[in-house]
Amino acid sequence: MPNEYSLLMPNTLDTLTTRVCDGQNYLLTPDCVCPILLKEGAQKLSTYLCRLFNASLQTGHFPSIGKRANIILLHKKNDKSCIANYRPLSLLISVGKAMERLVFKLLFQYFLDNFLISVWQ
């Protein structure tokens, strides 16, 4: 049943695998899943992630656990003993980041294909 989120759905395992697996290595996230696990296990996990992403987009509901983050302090410059020389960095749930990346790529391509946005924006 098509709905307003249907253009965002990966629909196929190939779409999910090719669009999510181009990520990078990151620090450990709140779900205790290292993103490299998603990248390396993409072929085996893609069926389940595709179902999860499609269900989330179809219902318009993103699980609240996917909105959690670990906050770490990242040193910017100068004296490490001064708290003002640090900035916060949010480490988000790996699966949530994968879904966010997928939705962005699908939306951006949709906008480009329909001349709703310039490649320079």
Image (spheres, rainbow, N blue to C red):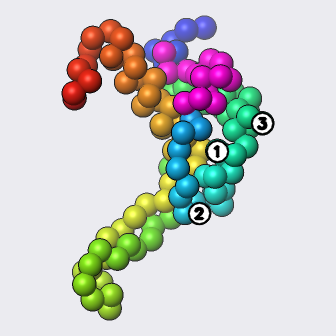
How packed mark 2 is, by other alpha carbons closer than 10 Å (few <14, some 14-19, many 20 or more), is some
Identify the image quadrant of the N terminus.
top right
Magenta segment? 7-19
Q: How many marks?
A: 3
Q: Is residue 120 left or right of residue 22?
A: left
Name which residue lies at 45% across and 71% down.
72
Name which residue lies at 66% across and 56% down.
33
Measured as percent of width and height from the top left, residue 27 is found at 55, 63
Q: CA distance from mark 1 to mark 2?
A: 14 Å
Residue 66 seen in render: no
Q: Nearer the viewer, residue 61 or 30?
A: 30
Q: Earlier in the sequence, mark 1 or mark 2?
A: 2
Q: Nearer the viewer, residue 36 or 98?
A: 36
Q: Nearer the viewer, residue 23 or 4?
A: 23
Q: Secondary structure at mark 2?
A: loop
Q: Does the stretch in magenta take in 16?
A: yes
Residue highlighted by disc 1: 39
Q: Amino acid at mark 1?
A: Lys
Q: Amino acid at mark 2?
A: Leu
Q: Are marks 3 and 2 in contact (CB under 8 Å)?
A: no
**The label number, if any, that marks residue 44 in the structure image:** 3
Q: Earlier in the sequence, mark 3 or mark 2?
A: 2
**The label number, if any, that marks residue 28 in the structure image:** 2
Q: CA distance from mark 3 to mark 2?
A: 21 Å
Name which residue lies at 65% across and 22% down.
14
